[in-house]
Amino acid sequence: MSIESNLLKKERQNVTFSVEELTNVWDGGKEDTEIRRKVVKVFGDDPVLKSPPICTMTREERYTEATRKCVYIFRNMLQKNGIYPGSKEFEHFWNAMPIEYTLLIHMGAFIPCIMSFGSEEQVAKWLPLSANLNIICTYAQTELGHGSFLRGLETEATFDRETQEFVINCPKVSSMKWWPGDMGLNANHALVMANLIVGGKKYGMHPFMVQIRDLSTHMPLPGVTVGDIGSKMGFEAIDNGFLYMKNVRIPRENLLNKNSEVKPDGTYVKKASDRLMYGSMVNLRVNLPKSQAIDVLAKACTIAIRYSAVRRQGLLNPGGAEVAVLDYTLQQHKLIPQLATVYATKFAGEGIIKKHQAFLQNMAKGNISDLAEIHALSASFKASVSEQCTEGVEVCRRACGGHGYSQASGLPHLLSKVTPTCTYEGENTVLYLQTARYLVKCAKEKAADLPESILFLVQPIQNARGNITSLDNLALYFKNRAALCVQAASKKVNQMSNKGLAMHEAWDKSSVQLVHATKAYVIQYIFDAFASFVKEVKCSKSVKEILEDLCCLYGLHYINNCSGDFLKLGILTAHHCNIAEEAEIALLEKLRPNAVGIVDAFDFTDSSMESCLGAYDGNVYERLFDMAKLSPLNKEPVHQASYKYLRPYLLEGRDILEGAKSKL
Ligand SMILES: CCCCCCCCCCCCCCCC(=O)SCCNC(=O)CCNC(=O)[C@H](O)C(C)(C)COP(=O)(O)OP(=O)(O)OC[C@H]1O[C@@H](n2cnc3c(N)ncnc32)[C@H](O)[C@@H]1OP(=O)(O)O
Ligand SMILES: Cc1cc2nc3c(=O)[nH]c(=O)nc-3n(C[C@H](O)[C@H](O)[C@H](O)COP(=O)(O)OP(=O)(O)OC[C@H]3O[C@@H](n4cnc5c(N)ncnc54)[C@H](O)[C@@H]3O)c2cc1C
């Protein structure tokens, strides 16, 4: 056993709680852990899912491998193993997916969309075809020229009454669809968001099913120009695409018509609120943070903490032995708060998923009264979590020094996976501003008209009592801060407007404060949800203590990072801030011996991380060397390029050196 493996073994011997029990809490119960492990095992044992490490493959190989595996998973493997949508097994299936996958938009965005936009007959037609991969469909909303401002989308669907068809056109280069996943190479259909035009009148954005490739040859259909947009910062296996449509005709029935319809005579019938057109985005904003951001940060923490426990560099005591870098207070200050973020966002996110499910049940009965609240909550939650996790993964990557820059660490891949979560499904600033709109409105309402989650905005500010670092008091500081920030931002909008600025100008001039206030609102939500979870969870004292410490650390770390805000608003004094700073450092020291145990409790398999630094056995140096040997550049002892271009000068060098030798 290597020295490094031994070090991790010792770390595990010192853990003061049951790792298995924390895993159960993380998964949502013992039974869930068993189900997840079963699913992970099925995937892990399947030889069809084996492929070379992604850092040794070209983009084309990565796309090909990911598509091969995903077709197998979705077409054969899930059915063979009884993993169906809606089952517990399916909930854990993201955890078991290969490190790179395609068909994500088809399965994760298109299928939920067809269910929310399609009539019963349309769902009956398109759902089985897509579930069986008989068609592959992308979600084509964003255009080259517009992504955020959806009223600016330019693609048109004009009703031709004579032929009972819609004619789809992208009038300009800027109107072509750009970015949708699975669109460049795999999709033969696209759910196109286009402006509906009937009899010359524009009705705004509507969803249309458009066939883009021939079903037998897979060639683009007439009028369709489609392809891959090229290499990106990450997601290299996915064929994000462009789609340029000129006079593409589709039958009238291909307008997804659960919410609105065009009758054969051209009559436009609106059946539900326009807002439901945005429902698919709410659905993804609620559901994607866990698999695309929180789990990604959890993996980065696993890698960085295991590595920091075996990486020895420098001395803490003069003349003593070299220490693991995790023993430095500053390394703990970088990494342990990231663990707290993982826990806080995961448990707060579960609350939002439940709220959303309740909303969907009400919606099925025709009640959409909670739409504004769930939109505001999901938009700011997605924005905040994606931001926190992206920052966290980068902190973990840098905390691994030089090796964190190597693809072999697995960290660059995680960073490139998490960073676009700040952009897709709504650019974060745009989402914060959506929530700000809701908060400013709520701040003017009477308490009786507000949902519980937002009541604190209009209630009197309460004073903290007793231990200033108790979870109750921390929750209170966050609430007070959010309420005061929203009031300040609303006041600024009013002041600007009273000065004679038009509302949109007043809004823009106040947008820095508005986004700040929204961030304060969502952090109070996350902290409150995590603190409530910690209070209520049934578990042993030792596991509870870990969770309480993580919760307290999450709050303190945040407060210490923006203490100016708490001081400015009069919520904390300088004395309180000093106590908070010392309390955070004390918590880091307390959590340090359990850090490896806490990341072990995430229970990630080595293959799900593909990291030489984060493997369970801690054998980092052998793994790094083995991975380097697999580099395609090392295939031959002499690389053609270096030989070809350097050879003349090397030969000159040889002659000079040999001449010098003969003169000696
Ligand atoms: C199933 C399991 C999955 C598991 C996990 C899968 C993983 C799967 C990984 C995915 C991997 C990559 C997936 C990328 C996929 C894309 O990126 S698809 C493209 C996504 N694009 C976007 O999100 C566009 C973002 N832009 C927006 O949302 C814009 O802010 C808006 C809302 C459209 C424009 O704002 P605006 O001009 O103010 O809007 P307007 O049309 O005037 O409407 C405003 C009113 O509607 C309301 N409203 C706006 N949006 C909404 C909404 N969403 N809901 C309700 N009301 C709304 C406003 O609150 C406002 O209400 P009032 O204040 O008037 O009462
Ligand atoms: C990996 C990836 C996958 C994607 N997958 C899909 C997909 O499957 N389907 C799909 O349709 N799209 C997809 N997209 C597109 C994505 O949804 C858009 O990129 C996103 O909505 C942001 O829009 P944008 O690119 O137009 O940014 P822009 O809106 O142009 O943003 C540029 C800057 O302008 C700022 N800005 C914009 N509006 C405002 C405002 N009102 N106030 C203040 N600042 C503002 C933004 O904050 C940002 O800083 C994907 C994108 C990525 C990166």
Image: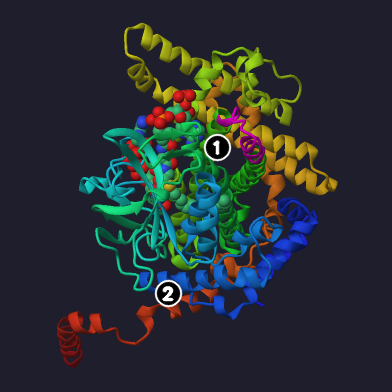
Which span of residues is magenta-colored? 357-371
Q: Quadrant of residue 569?
A: top right
Q: Which mark is residue 378?
A: 1
Q: Position of residue 640 (x, y in %)?
A: 25, 84
Q: Quadrant of the C terminus?
A: bottom left
Query: Which residue is located at x 68 percent, y 50 percent?
Result: 592
Alpha carbon distance from label 1 to label 2: 37 Å
Q: Which mark is residue 658?
A: none
Mark 2 lies on a secondary structure that is helix
Q: Is residue 98 above or below residue 579?
A: below
Q: Residues within 10 Å of mark 2 (few under 14, many from 20)?
A: some
Q: Quadrant of residue 286?
A: top right
Q: Position of residue 18 (x, y in %)?
A: 80, 56
Can residue 427 be seen?
no
| Viewer-closest of 186 and 27 | 186
Q: Which residue is mark 2?
A: 56
